[in-house]
Image: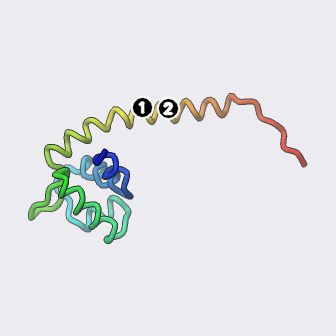
């Protein structure tokens, strides 16, 4: 599936996340700082996300397109599920009997 390939690329989800949190368009440098990535990776992801009509660019900076906003809305329930799953794993690990290490 093309979408999962795109979203699985390094920093793609982080770029979407940072743009979804922004109250206004972000400049390249502001997005680079927010996403904590290097310019080369960010430039590649933005090019791909713009080609897929998920991100838009204007004079003010980068923002999610309406399609990108709809995509993030679909991803948020997955994020909530992942948080619950992570907590379940932590609880299960704490509850598991500890086996003594051999000397």
Q: Is residue 11 above or below residue 77?
A: below
Q: Residue furthest left?
A: 59
Q: Quadrant of residue 99?
A: top right
Q: Residue furthest front?
A: 1
Badge count: 2
Label annotation for residue 81: 1
Relative side of 6 to 88, left or right: left
Please report the residue visible at 20 percent of the width from the left and 39 percent of the height from the top: 70
Which element type, helix, strand or loop, lies under badge 1? Answer: helix
Q: Position of residue 65 (x, y in %)?
A: 15, 49
Q: Position of residue 50 (x, y in %)?
A: 18, 57
Please report the residue visible at 68 percent of the width from the left and 28 percent of the height from the top: 95
Relative side of 12 to 92, left or right: left
Disc 2: which residue: 85
Relative side of 67 to 88, left or right: left
Would you call the spot at circle 1 few (<14 residues within 10 Å), some (14-19), or many (20 or more)?
A: few
Please report the residue visible at 13 percent of the width from the left and 60 percent of the height from the top: 57
Would you call the spot at circle 2 few (<14 residues within 10 Å), some (14-19), or many (20 or more)?
A: few
Check the picture and name the quadrant holding the N terminus. Answer: top left
Q: CA distance from mark 1 to mark 2?
A: 6 Å
Which element type, helix, strand or loop, lies under badge 2? Answer: helix
Q: Nearer the viewer, residue 12 or 76?
A: 12
Q: Are marks 1 and 2 in contact (CB under 8 Å)?
A: yes
Please report the residue visible at 47 percent of the width from the left and 30 percent of the height from the top: 84
Q: How is the image coloured?
A: rainbow
Q: Position of residue 55 (x, y in %)?
A: 19, 54
Label annotation for residue 101: none
Q: Position of residue 97 (x, y in %)?
A: 75, 30
Q: Is residue 7 above or below residue 61?
A: above
């Amino acid at each position: 599936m093309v979408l999962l390939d795109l979203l699985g690329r390094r920093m793609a989800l982080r770029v979407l996340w940072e743009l979804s949190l922004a109250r206004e368009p972000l400049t390249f440098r502001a997005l680079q700082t927010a996403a904590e990535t290097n310019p080369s990776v960010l430039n590649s992801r933005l090019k791909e996300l713009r080609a897929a009509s998920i991100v838009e660019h204007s004079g003010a900076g980068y923002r999610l397109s309406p399609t990108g906003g709809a995509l993030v809305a679909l991803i948020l329930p997955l994020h909530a599920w992942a948080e619950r799953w992570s907590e379940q794993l932590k609880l299960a690990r704490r509850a598991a009997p500890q086996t003594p290490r051999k000397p």
